[in-house]
Image (tube, helix red, strand yellow):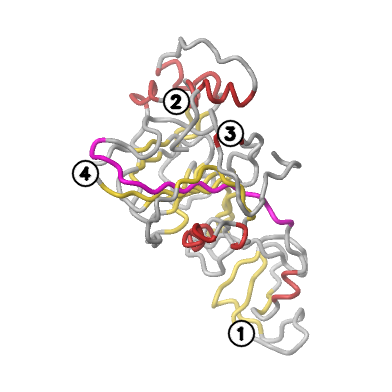
Amino acid sequence: MEDAESIDQVAEALGISAPEPSVVLRSAEACREHLEVLRRYKGEQGQQRAWLTVEKDLTFPAPKGINVNMMPFIMGDRLSIPEELRGYWPIIEQCSGSDDNRSHNIPSSKKCPSCHRSRMVFSEEHIVEDCEFCPEACGGPAWHCLHCHAKVCTTCCPPLKSHAQKPEVWYLTIQEGLVPKGTTQRRPGLHIDGGGLVLKEGGRWSAEWLNWGEVFEEFTGGIYMASNVSNTCKVWNVRVKDQPEVCGPNGSLEHLREIMPEGRLLEEGELVWITDTTPHESVPLDEEVRRQFIRVVTKSVSVWYEQHSTKNPKGVVPDPAVT
C-alpha cells in the first residue's frame, strides 16, 4: 500500500527478532526476469491486468482530520463503521462490485436463483416479459446470468437475497491532513504491498468475452485506493513474481526503478483496484494541499497487526477463520 510498518515494528508485532539492517539487494538487471510487464489493456482476449480503474469522479466528504489504519468492518454494512466515517461510505460501496449499473460491467455479488452462481449483470437491454422467479407477473429491464443465461426481473430482491453470502470483514484506512510541498502523505518510494500487507488472496483479475463482443471483467481480493488530489499516486501495470528474490525491506522496489516501464499517475477521485504485487508509489506534492486518502483491503488479510491498526469501536474484529 502507500504505507508500511518499519522492519522493527513488524518484527515486534510478530514476536521475533528484527533482521540485521544491512540488506544486500540484487541488481536491477538480475531482477528483470521476476517482473511481469503487462501490455496496455485494450480489452483483447488473453490479456492480464495488474490494476484497473473501478470508478472516476468520486466525491470526497468534507475533511474532519480522520486518521484510521486497517480498521476492520463488515463490507456491505454501513452501520459497522463509526458515524464520523460514514461520509466515505459511498466510496466504500464502489469497492464491492455490487452496484447494478457499473460502467465496467463487473458481475454483481448477487446470486442467480437458477444456477446459484454470482455472475449476475444488469442491463436495460435485457428485457424479461414474465419472470419465472417472481411471485407476480412482471416485466422490464432484468438481471442476466452469465452462466445459465437466466433473466431475472428487478423486483426479485427476496429470491436474490436468499442466497446472500456470509458477511465479510474488510479493512479500512482513511487519512486526512495538510501535506507540505515536496513531501508525501503516504509511504514514498516504489514498492508493493506484498512485503508488509499479508494477503491470502492478493488479487485476481479475469475477463469473459461474450458472443456479442462485450467484455465482462471480474476481479477478486486485492486492494482499493483513491485520493482527492491528482498526480499524487502512481501505479504500474506490472506484477512482481518471486517477491523474496526481488524486494527490499517492506516490499521496496526502488532499486528496480531504472527497468520499470512507464507508470500512470492517478486522477482526483479515481478509485483503483490493485493486487498485492502491483508496484505503486506516493508522489511528492507540487504545493501544500489538504489531501484525503482512502484504502479498502479485502477480507483475505492473514495477519492483522493490532498494535499498529485502529480498533473498531463498533466491536468488529478480524474473522478468526481468515485472519
Q: Residues within 10 Å of mark 3 (few under 14, many from 20)?
A: few
Q: State which region is magenta.
A: 166-182
Image location of residue 192, percent across then percent down: 48, 32
Q: Is residue 180 magenta?
A: yes
Q: Residues within 10 Å of mark 4 (few under 14, many from 20)?
A: few
Image location of residue 59, percent across then percent down: 39, 62
Q: Which mark is residue 252?
A: 2
Which badge, 4 or 3, comes first in the chain's sequence?
A: 4
Which badge, 1 or 4, comes first in the chain's sequence?
A: 1
Quarter of the figure that contains the C terminus: top right
**Quarter of the image where one finds residue 107:** bottom right
- Report the amino acid beneath label 2: Ser
Q: Which residue is mark 1?
A: 140
Which badge, 1 or 3, comes first in the chain's sequence?
A: 1
Which badge, 4 or 2, comes first in the chain's sequence?
A: 2
- Report the amino acid beneath label 1: Gly
Q: Is residue 314 magenta?
A: no
Closer to the observer: label 1 or label 4?
Answer: 4
